Structures are given as structure tokens and as C-alpha cells.
């Protein structure tokens, strides 16, 4: 029996794995490419959220008061995102009773800059960008879909590696293997374009898929990092056991002042000036959960200078809502290499680590997946249609 050359075997494996997974990978990658501009797309679709004229920004306490007035039945924790100065303030209320049968579907609310008006409300998954997020992250199948996405990502990494092995040139033929060959056939040209585009996008695709797998399979990722490096740490849920005071909660501004002071002393000073405190950017405010006496604290989420993630940074400060005492500080960057790797995952995957340049680049990489699939599929169809049909008689020229 004649043995199949290694590269030929790799090509067959790459072909059939690509045909099996290709369409789903295109859906995942194109939805992900769009989500790189999640905020911009949503703002474009809802121009009422943009600041039309100069107004005095409200305090965070005014914004919370408006939320409490508009939604008196929502007495749990509000998560308020600190947006840029040109967009309305957005807030989330997790596990509202209205969507309790929909899995992850928090109430999403946008409050005007004056802190007095609710401009818009909706539920996660009920409008375009969040529907795209669910499609990208779960294939619209909830937690089960996320696991499927994770293992599909592992298969996609194998697909990438099999494509590289199928192309891998023999010794002394590297230069030749990177060139377009003088071909007259469509099949040959399609192969060359697929090869070149695949080689160009190999590394960025590997980064995107690998980070996506690690985000989709956090337990498995943590287990591997624990074995290879050190235990992965995360912010703990604090349970307050002191009796509830009759006094009202302190203001968000008071709690924020305590948090900033504590985190400034916790983090090292800038290398350029040991007396200069590190720059901190507030990203999120989690208000106390009034439905749970043990959770009566504010949580402030900060971006520190070493943190590449702009929307979801990894430094948390918890402040008692009645005493203003700082009860916990957690920063991913204090806990070794494994945590640093975890801290980079989201920022690499959504492109925020590289600003607008990387986000635009990720957009093109996502589009490249569609082109790779089309080039490979069309080439396969042409080759399949060219194969002789064994049921038809063959003309023999004498």
C-alpha cells in the first residue's frame, strides 16, 4: 500500500476540518470584528446618547438618585460605567425579574449628563450590539454555547496549524513557496491567494483565537495556569458581618475619595518620580446591594498605568457604604505571571490594548477569515466538479 506523503495528509485534514467548521468560524469572527467597535456602533444607532451641547456634568450621586427614582423596585446593585465625556452615562442592573428566564440579560439604562433624565432603557440581548455579543460568545445557546465556542476555538487552532503544515516547504524551497506561481488555472490562483492570506494572518488569528478560547473556558485556563505557573487569584466577595447602622449610606463621592486615597498608597509610585502617585482612571462604580445586608459596600474598578484594558480593568477597591472604611483592595498585577496573563486576555481580544490601530487591524483580520473560507470553498467546489463521473462512458481515442 502506497503511503500518503505528510503534506498531502495535512492538506486533506485541513480541507475537511475547514469545510466542517468554516461557516461557523466566519460567523464568530465577523461578529467579533463588529464588536471591536461595540460602543461606536451602539452610539451611531442611538444618536440621542451623544452630548448635543455643553452641560454641567452631574455627580454620581445624582445619577444614582435618578436610577432609584425611575426604578424604585430595583434596590440591588447598579453597575455604572464611566463613559467618555461625550456619551450618556450607562448603568446595568443584573438579574431583573423581567428577564429571569433569559439567562444573562441585565437591564441596561442610559442617563443624561445632567443626571436627571433616563434617555434610554433596554435589556441585554434585545438590541443589536448585545445580540451580536451573544452570537459571538454563546452562538445564542447560553452557557452551553460558550463551552461550544471554546472547544470550537481549539479546533480552529488545529485548523491553523494544519494549514501551516500543509504549506511547510521542503528544505531549500522557502523562497519559491512564498511566491505566486505562473498559473493559468483558477484553481491554482485560488490556492496561491489562500496560501498568502493564510500566512499573513496566521499570527494575528492565532492570538485572537487563543485569547478567545481562554476567555470562553476560564476554568480550564485557570487549571492550566495553576499547573504551569502559580494559582490564579481573583477579587473576593466580601461579607460584612457588622450590624446594620441606622445611618444612611455615605455618598458615592465620599466613598470614591476613600478608594482613591487607599489605592494610591497601595500601588507603587511612578518610576520617573518616586513621589508622584500613579495615574488612576475610574472605569466602573458598583453600588451597594440593598437587598443583602452583607453586601453594603461600594466597589470601584480602576485602570492603573500597567493595565491595558480600558473598559474592564482589573483593579478593585471595596468601601464600606456606612463607615467609608476601605475593606478590600485587589489588583491583578500584584499576583504573579498567571494573573498578568489573565489581565491581558480581554484587552488583546477586543483590541483595546493597542488603541484604534489594533482595533482596525482586528477588523481586517476578522474579514480575512471570510476570504479564507471563500477561497478554500470555491477551490474545493471547482476541483470537485472537475472530477470525472465514473457512471459516464469515457471516450477512447485510438
Image (cartoon, rainbow, N blue to C red):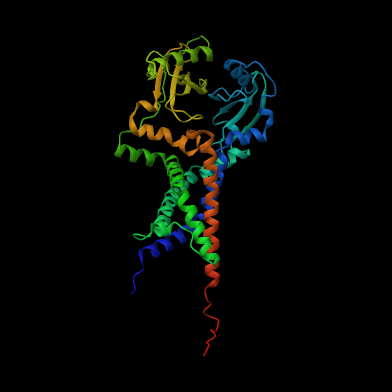
Q: Quadrant of residue 381?
A: bottom right
Between 113 and 199, the one nearer to me in the picture: 199
Relative to 369, residue 328 above or below: above
Between 180 and 16, the one nearer to me in the picture: 180
Total numbered labels: 0
Residue at 42% across, 59% down: 177
Relative to 111, residue 40 above or below: below
User: What percent of the width, then of the height, locates residue 256?
Assistant: 49, 15
Q: Quadrant of residue 239?
A: top left
State whether residue 135 appears in this view.
no
Between 81 and 273, the one nearer to me in the picture: 273
Using residue 306 as the reference point, say whether residue 79 is left or right of it.
Answer: right
Q: Residue furthest bottom?
A: 398
The N terminus appears in which quarter of the rendering? Answer: bottom left
Residue at 63% across, 38% down: 127
Using residue 64 as the reference point, say whether residue 318 is left or right of it.
Answer: left
User: What percent of the width, then of the height, locates residue 54?
Assistant: 68, 19
State whether residue 189 appears in this view.
yes
User: What percent of the width, then of the height, locates residue 376?
Assistant: 51, 59
User: What percent of the width, then of the height, locates residue 77?
Assistant: 53, 24
Between 95 and 78, the one nearer to me in the picture: 78
Q: Quadrant of residue 52?
A: top right
Amino acid at each position: 500500500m502506497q503511503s500518503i506523503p505528510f503534506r498531502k495528509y495535512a492538506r486533506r485534514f485541513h480541507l475537511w476540518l475547514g469545510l466542517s467548521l468554516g461557516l461557523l468560524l466566519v460567523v464568530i469572527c465577523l461578529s467579533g470584528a463588529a464588536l471591536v467597535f461595540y460602543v461606536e456602533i451602539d452610539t451611531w444607532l442611538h444618536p440621542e446618547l451623544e452630548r448635543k451641547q455643553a452641560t454641567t456634568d452631574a455627580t454620581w450621586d445624582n445619577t444614582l438618585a435618578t436610577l432609584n427614582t425611575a426604578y424604585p423596585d430595583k434596590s440591588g446593585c447598579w453597575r455604572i460605567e464611566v463613559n467618555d465625556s461625550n456619551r450618556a452615562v450607562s448603568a446595568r442592573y443584573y438579574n431583573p425579574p423581567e428577564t429571569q428566564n433569559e439567562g444573562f440579560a441585565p437591564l441596561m439604562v442610559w442617563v443624561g449628563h445632567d443626571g436627571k433624565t433616563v434617555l434610554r432603557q433596554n435589556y441585554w440581548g434585545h438590541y443589536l450590539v448585545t445580540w451580536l455579543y451573544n452570537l459571538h460568545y454563546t452562538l445564542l445557546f447560553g452557557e452551553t454555547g460558550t463551552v461550544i465556542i471554546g472547544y470550537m476555538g481549539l479546533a480552529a487552532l488545529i485548523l491553523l496549524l494544519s494549514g501551516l503544515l500543509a504549506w511547510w516547504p521542503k528544505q531549500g524551497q522557502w523562497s519559491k513557496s512564498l511566491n505566486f506561481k505562473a498559473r493559468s488555472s483558477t484553481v491554482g490562483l485560488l490556492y496561491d491567494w489562500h496560501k498568502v492570506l493564510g500566512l499573513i494572518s496566521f499570527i494575528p488569528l492565532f492570538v485572537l483565537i487563543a485569547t478567545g478560547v481562554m476567555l470562553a473556558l476560564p476554568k480550564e485556563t485557570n487549571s492550566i495556569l495553576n499547573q504551569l505557573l502559580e494559582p490564579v487569584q481573583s477579587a473576593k466577595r466580601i461579607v460584612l458581618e457588622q450590624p446594620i447602622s441606622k445611618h444612611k449610606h455615605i455618598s458615592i463621592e465620599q466613598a470614591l475619595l476613600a478608594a482613591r486615597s487607599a489605592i494610591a498608597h497601595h500601588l507603587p509610585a511612578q518610576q520617573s518620580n518616586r513621589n508622584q502617585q500613579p495615574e488612576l482612571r475610574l472605569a466602573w462604580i458598583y453600588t451597594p446591594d440593598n437587598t443583602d445586608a452583607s453586601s453594603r459596600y461600594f466597589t470601584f474598578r480602576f485602570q492603573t498605568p500597567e493595565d491595558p484594558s480600558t473598559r474592564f480593568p482589573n483593579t478593585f477597591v471595596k468601601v464600606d457604604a456606612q463607615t467609608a472604611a476601605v475593606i478590600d483592595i485587589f489588583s491583578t498585577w500584584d499576583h504573579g505571571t498567571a494573573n498578568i496573563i489573565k489581565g491581558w486576555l480581554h484587552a488583546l481580544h477586543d483590541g483595546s490594548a493597542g488603541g484604534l490601530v489594533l482595533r482596525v487591524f482586528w477588523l481586517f483580520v476578522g474579514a480575512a477569515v471570510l476570504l479564507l473560507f471563500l477561497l478554500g470553498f470555491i477551490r474545493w467546489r471547482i476541483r470537485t466538479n472537475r472530477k470525472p463521473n465514473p457512471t459516464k462512458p469515457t471516450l477512447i481515442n485510438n
